Image: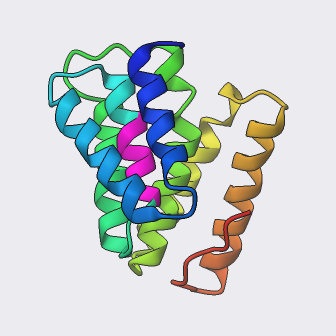
Amino acid sequence: MADDRMADIYAAVRLGGGDPDAVRAALTRLWSEIGEGGDPLHRCVVAHHLADVQELPEGALLWDQRALAAVFGPGIPLDEGLRGFLPSLYLNLADSHRRVGDFEMARMQLAIARGHLDVLANDAYGAVIRTGLSHVEAALESRSMERLPVS
């Protein structure tokens, strides 16, 4: 989907160049502009990226939950654009739950993520998500609550 708002979102993500404070500020501004009644895909993508730049795992979990809520809000049809995000959204929820020490919920979110893998192509993005699932699963097995390295 190529629209101006998505271009703004991805520009905000790139803006940081290693500065999570700049990314956080730009995305928070977009979150406010989009508002509660805004396009579900825009809300999902902004929240998804805001989760990635939170300093504390509790903050990441909150934004991951907001990203998923944007997809499943009242009256929102689950179109292909939103459906394509589900494996990544559930993967991130699993990782955030793991990082706050809720290992059972993390396992449940991983199972849900695996249940949505059929929407992913066998391309680089699909490989990133599948590898991420393996990394979170391994961290769960060792009961690690540490942030995983970005690959």
| Residue nearest the viewer, comparing 7 with 126 | 7
Q: Is residue 138 left or right of residue 26?
A: right
Which quadrant would the C terminus be assigned to in this image? Answer: bottom right
Q: Residue at x 21, y 15 (%)?
A: 75
Count the numbered circles shown. 0
Q: Position of residue 44 (x, y in %)?
A: 37, 35
Residue 114, placed above or below residue 19 = above
Q: Which colour scheme appears in the figure? A: rainbow
Q: Main secondary structure of the magenta part?
A: helix
Q: Position of residue 43 (x, y in %)?
A: 31, 32
| Residue nearest the viewer, comparing 11 with 108 | 11
Q: Residue at x 24, y 42 (%)?
A: 29
Q: Residue at x 78, y 27 (%)?
A: 121
Q: Residue at x 45, y 24 (%)?
A: 6
Which quadrant would the N terminus be assigned to in this image? Answer: top right
- In the rendered image, which quarter is residue 18 located in? bottom right
The residue stretch that appears in magenta? 45-52
